Image (tube, helix red, strand yellow):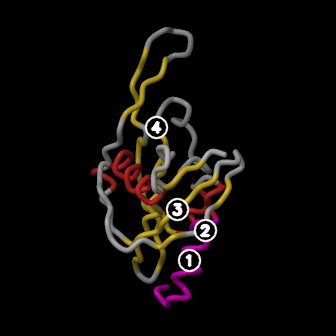
Amino acid sequence: MKQSAGILVYRIKNKSLEILLVHPGGPFWVKKDIGAWTIPKGEPGEAEDLLITAKREFVEETGKEITGSFIELKPIKQKSGKLIFAWAIESEFNVSELKSNMFEIEWPPGSAKKKSFPEIDKAEWFNKEKALIKINSGQQGLINELEEILKQNKTL
């Protein structure tokens, strides 16, 4: 079964939960919006610790390191069957400083020409309601679980 590990970055503004989401780059995603956004995440290397994977992927996809106190969330399964492991952390992120790694594919298909695209083409802060609309539906549970944890801790 495929696995992925990622970081759900959040902040609290005016007693309201805001979530940082990223949009996949490349020609397949260029016109997709609702349900296309995700948390920064990626697949682990062989026997790689999943939190280390999540931190590495965050750097690769955003250009920024993230440190602090992580909240482990329950793994969720997306429609594709991929199991997503995630950790939440309260942090700030300036979306204008996004610097994603690149990937290369044949584009246009059948042209035998290679073209490079950013793995992530944009990042944006969303309030919880909008984040639940924008995020891949298989990852909505991460946001809902985080909100419950923050309410239990009286943070929200």
Residue at horizontal 40 percent and vertical 77 percent from the top: 13
Residue density around tag 1, few if under 14, some if 14–19, many if 20 or more, within 10 Å: some
Which residue type carries mark 2? Answer: Lys
Task: Look at the numbered discs 1 and 2 and tell me whether their residues touch, using CB distance below 8 Å.
Answer: no
Task: Look at the numbered discs 1 and 4 and tell me whether their residues touch, using CB distance below 8 Å.
Answer: no
Task: Look at the numbered discs 4 and 3 and tell me whether their residues touch, using CB distance below 8 Å.
Answer: no
Residue behind mark 4:
25
The span from disc 3 to disc 2 (Cα, nearest Å) is: 7 Å
Q: Looking at this view, is 10 or 15 the one in front?
A: 10
Q: Earlier in the sequence, mark 3 or mark 2?
A: 2
The span from disc 2 to disc 4 (Cα, nearest Å) is: 27 Å
Q: Earlier in the sequence, mark 4 or mark 3?
A: 4
Residue behind mark 3:
86
Classify residue 118 by image quadrant: top left
**Residue 153 image point, x, y percent:** 50, 88
Which residue type carries mark 3? Answer: Ala
User: Where are the magenta residues, as a range?
Assistant: 141-156
Q: Within the magenta stretch, is there residue 148?
A: yes
Residue at horizontal 63 percent and vertical 53 percent from the top: 83
Q: Regarding mark 3 in the picture, which secondary structure is present there?
A: strand
Direction from residue 56 to residue 81 in the image, left or right: right
Residue behind mark 2:
74
65 versus 155 height, above or below = above
Residue behind mark 1:
147
Residue at horizontal 37 percent and vertical 51 percent from the top: 56
The span from disc 4 to disc 3 (Cα, nearest Å) is: 21 Å
Q: Regarding mark 2 in the picture, which secondary structure is present there?
A: loop
Q: Earlier in the sequence, mark 1 or mark 2?
A: 2
Which residue type carries mark 1? Answer: Glu
